[in-house]
Image (tube, rainbow, N blue to C red):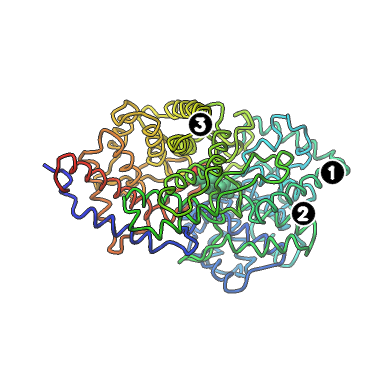
Amino acid sequence: MNHWAVQTDLSGAVDSALRHLQETQAPDGSWHGDYGGPVFLLPTLIAATHIIDEPFDRETEQDFIRFFKHNQNADGGWPLHINGRSYVYTTALCYVAQRLLGVPAEDLDLQRGRSWLLEHGGAANMPPWGKFLLALLNLYHYDGVLPVPPELWLLPAAFPAHPSRFWCHSRMVYLPMSYLYGIRAQAPLAPDIRSLREEIYCEPFDEVDYRASQMRCAPSDIHTPFSAGYRLMNRLLNAYEAVARKGLRERANAFVLDHVRQEDENTNTICIGPINKVLNMLCWHFAEPRGERVARHRRQLPEYLWKGPNGTHMQGYNSSKLWDTAFAVQAIRATGRMAEARDTVHRAHGYIDRNQVLEDTPHRARYFRDPSKGGWPFSDRNHGWPISDCTAEGLKCAIALGDHVAEPIAGERLDDAAALILGWQNADGGWPTYEKARAPSWMEALNPSLVFADIMIDHSYVECTSACVQALISYRDQGVNPEIGKRIEKAVARGRAFLLKRQHADGSWMGAWGICFTYGTWFAVSALRAAGLSADSEPVSRAASFLVSRQLPDGGWGETIESCWRGEYASSPDGQVVMTSWAVLSLLQSDMADSEPVRAAVRFLQERQRADGSWPDETFTGVFNRTCAITYDNYRKVFGLWALAAAETRLNAEAKARGSAP
Ligand code: LAN
């Protein structure tokens, strides 16, 4: 019997999902969607534009307020990410931001927010980043800010805790922070600030014990407590701050400002991420008031904004365009309808072609940068920071599209990408996000954020490793010289060993950037299969058993962000399209490819699909630093299509094997 016959019109479902994907392609060839979710970014931006006195137009500001109102929790507080529980960090920031936007303190929602805040210890109970921002606004005393002296940058680079060894996102936040701290940057004490001082603390502003509150934080906000090592270091930093000499401070400030300038120039003032974007802008506001550099930053800011149905907010990156486009291309390819989708594919190829990084950053060693030439970024080439897995997905697409486009990307550019990937592999066989490991793992203990985990160094990740392994294999398979071939073979073997070591006892892999085990498992299984493991090999079979054990009665899979911070599978009550698609894509590569669980999952995907080929919005699928959820708007249409297409391919292959039409 043909088990697949139960799937009514699978090819029709693929057709309509493909049509929907094609219809939503942007004119530049990419897929562009909301990259939101975090709630702490927008208030940070509003504080900064307030400090530089360059607010947004009234209409946009009203839309910011709409975002805040929409995302206020029933208890009165604000969450770290949309739909999360309340944090003191975001509650204080969202309260302050709305006041700066002109919402009166008597506003009923703000009153509820203030009550929640004061019940949870007030703004002196915020985690360090929040206090730092309040200090910039002149709403908090610098005595209560964890010292971040710029002089650390002047230490010999060989020093193991030198900031050049931090994960680039933390490094690029710490950089402008150390400048602003070094000069004790502070907005003037305007009347709105004066009244806010009386609204957000449990005690009168001048009676807050700032020094004692340096390390104080509400339990609701603590994910990674201060380590003993950090406490000791913080004592040393405070002692240093008490004796810091002016001459050295000025030298350090100049050094830091030069690095801020270089980051701005490398990224066309986009900066690596939203927080350092805002802080770099503030550096220039204080260093060169009303100068061209701060103006350029301010002009560029709207690129980070997204106007959604529930208000305008600040996104986690300037976009996720390259990443989404690379997956869209692979989903289309899985349909086997490249010829039908020719124009779409051409335009997507154009985007991938135009957005490869073609040169290293200037004086890269002096500015602590790895090579960039040949890499692909997450958003676009203007941003410029290449990422291991984005490079890998870009390379996979460039190779896959080589036969389908008139002007394939030149071979030397593919060579550069492959060389970059090879150069990024860590000693443990895994791949990091942006940069090869620069520091020992104990440095993670110096994480001062409390709110986030795994931010101090660039660790090796399952997803990055998997993408790099797959890309190297595709690159090798199109023919390389024996010497490179040998290097790739070794790199792949080490990557494979890394992945096998990371498999959990239950057969799963934990993802770090998607939620969560369904994501990690899909990446790992895909790489292991590409690297030669068979569908019935023990690791792949165990992964399949794990997935089947987590399938929900509706035929789907669904995970919540709890999976990420608990490190244990946390199921949602109902199946979710994206997680179900990841599970299907994994199972189809296993010895369970032809099984009732897969058929039930495909039925689930078909049932959830709307008439126009799309799927309705669901829970978050992305995460960072284990605690903050982030939206991948395009994942439903991309992975939904990919999973259905892979199932259809399988069905056709079976029919062919039996010598009958499907
Ligand atoms: C991203 C976005 C892309 C993401 C992938 C490429 C998907 C991933 O496979 C590797 C890690 C990476 C590059 C990533 C890392 C952390 C980022 C940069 C983000 C999730 C986007 C926003 C986040 C950044 C740290 C947010 C700013 C907040 C701070 C705590 C600094």
Mark-to-mark CA distance, 2 and 1: 17 Å
Residue 244 position within the rendered picture, expressed as x and y whole percent measured from the top left: 84, 40
Q: Answer with the quarter of the image where residue 613 lies.
A: bottom left
| Label 3, label 1: how far apart the Cα atoms are | 49 Å
| Residue drawn at 30 percent across, 46 percent down | 646
| Residue bearing mark 3 | 481
Q: Residue furthest bottom?
A: 58
User: Does the beta carbon at disc 1 come under 8 Å from ligand 1?
Assistant: no
What percent of the width, then of the height, locates residue 579? 36, 46
Residue ID for mark 1 = 251
Q: How many C-alpha atoms fall within 10 Å of the one at disc 1: few (<14), some, or many (≥20)?
A: some
**Residue type marked 3:** Asn
Measured in 3D between alpha carbons, the distance from the residue under mark 2 to the one under mark 3, in whole angstroms, is: 56 Å
Identify which residue, 69 or 284, lies in the foreground: 284
Local packing at callout 3 (Cα closer than 10 Å; few below 14, some 14-19, many 20+) is few
Residue at the right extreme?
247
Q: Which residue is mark 2?
A: 185
The picture places residue 152, in percent across and down from the top left corner, at: 76, 37
> For the residue labelled by badge 1, is the local secondary structure a helix, a strand or a loop?
helix
Q: Categorize mark 2 by other alpha carbons within 10 Å: few (<14), some (14-19), many (20+).
A: many
Residue drawn at x 62%, y 66% is 99
Which is more foreground, mark 3 or mark 1?
Answer: 3
Judge from the rendering whether residue 360 lies leftward or rightward of residue 578; answer left or right.
right
- Give the amino acid at mark 1: Arg
Can residue 223 be spotted in the picture? no
- Indicate the secondary structure of the residue bearing disc 2: loop
Observer-nearest residue: 16 or 474?
Answer: 474
Mark identifier at residue 261: none
Percent from the top left, x then y, of residue 104?
Answer: 61, 70
Of badges 2 and 1, nearer the viewer stands 1
